Image (spheres, rainbow, N blue to C red):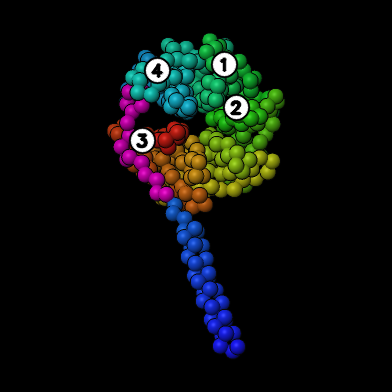
Amino acid sequence: IISIVTLLILIILAVGIYLIIHFTSRTASTTNVVTPSLRWNTTGVTAAGVGGSPGNNSSQLNTPADVSVDFSNTLYIADYGNNRIQKWLSGASNGTTVAGQASGISGSNATDLQHPAGILVDSTGNIYIADTNNHRIQFWAKGALSGVTIAGTGFMGVNNNQLEFPYFLALNENTKTLYISDHDNNRIMSYASVGTVAAGGNGFGTSYTQLEYPVGLYLDSLTNSLVVANSAAHNIVRWILGDNSWTQVAGISGIQGNSSSLLNLPMGVTFDPMVNTYVADAYNHRIKFFLPDQSEGRTIAGITSSPGMNDIQLNTPYSIRLDNQLNL
């Protein structure tokens, strides 16, 4: 009997050891997550415009600001200096004017624009335009010949129905709520039927409740927050909708520089599906890439502090967008 009991104990121990080893091995193999290493070509290809040659013909641009990319990788460009929006098909050598005057003439009526900085195209092809120097947001339905003012009055001001040099835009497609970087009012405005302050609005400054000339916007639906290129404070901040302060995503508030952890007048920001952050670091003439929760970024386009017009350089990049293949 003793030998049988001993044998049973040995069998139980052997089975237990096998299960422990097997379970540990399976656990280790399933938790060993490899973070993908994203790489981009260091040499760029001109997709629109003629490098170093500003102009108003169909092949040229003049101080392009923001850009929007639709599902077919067609570019919509806020041709700021030409007071128009250009639609540029992938691989084309010329663009077509879809808002404003093709000649580049500015104005304030429904068919005109005056230095538009921001452009957003929704999933059905409608265009939202930050008509910056007209202090208004224009909505151009797909194929329309004129726009409709949906935010702002056409005159600068600080009231909730007014804007002062609006720059970039973000849209919640489900609720049709539009978010506007109200640059000179140091706030982000939320527009559904009326305007409300969604972020900032507490004056010009670097504290956690203030913004300093906000420009680029990204609506993060996963966290119900706005990510803001807080340009004059030299940082990227996250403002959860409904909160009264921000948390820092990249850069250091109030400190400019060109190291891997610092920014200099960041103008544009976007995320990819893996929640990595991309920053148009304007005065450092580069695009910075930040992994989630990392304060040190790496340059993926341009040469730090070296503006230029060759294929490996950038000159004051204002906007950053990704297409569906993560091309910049």
Which residue, given by chain and number where applicable, does mark 4 sit on?
A: 95
Q: Amino acid at mark 2?
A: Glu
Determine the residue positioned at 45% across, 33% down. 324
Asked if disc 2 and disc 3 are in contact, CB closer than 8 Å, the reply is no
Which residue, given by chain and number where applicable, does mark 2 sit on?
A: 164
In what element is the residue under mark 1?
loop
Label 4 – label 2 distance at C-alpha: 29 Å
Q: Which residues are magenta?
A: 36-51
Label 3 – label 4 distance at C-alpha: 21 Å
| Whether residue 195 is situated above or below residue 58 in the rendered picture | below
Q: Circle 1: is it few (<14), some (14-19), or many (20+) Cα within 10 Å?
A: some
In what element is the residue under mark 2?
loop
Q: Circle 2: is it few (<14), some (14-19), or many (20+) Cα within 10 Å?
A: many
| Whether residue 54 is situated above or below residue 21 in the rendered picture | above
Determine the residue positioned at 38% across, 24% down. 90
Q: Position of residue 80 (x, y in %)?
A: 46, 23
Q: Label for residue 141?
A: 1
Foreground residue, 184 or 146?
146
Left or right of 226 on screen, residue 258 = left
Query: Is 47 in the magenta?
Result: yes
Label 4 – label 1 distance at C-alpha: 19 Å
Determine the residue positioned at 32% across, 31% down. 45
Q: Amino acid at mark 1?
A: Ala
Which residue is farthest front?
1
Mark yes or no: residue 23 visible: yes
* N-terminal-most mark, 1 or 3: 1
Mark yes or no: residue 283 visible: no
Label 2 – label 3 distance at C-alpha: 28 Å
Camera-side mark, 4 or 2: 4
Q: Position of residue 16 (x, y in %)?
A: 55, 74
Which residue, given by chain and number where applicable, does mark 3 sit on?
A: 314
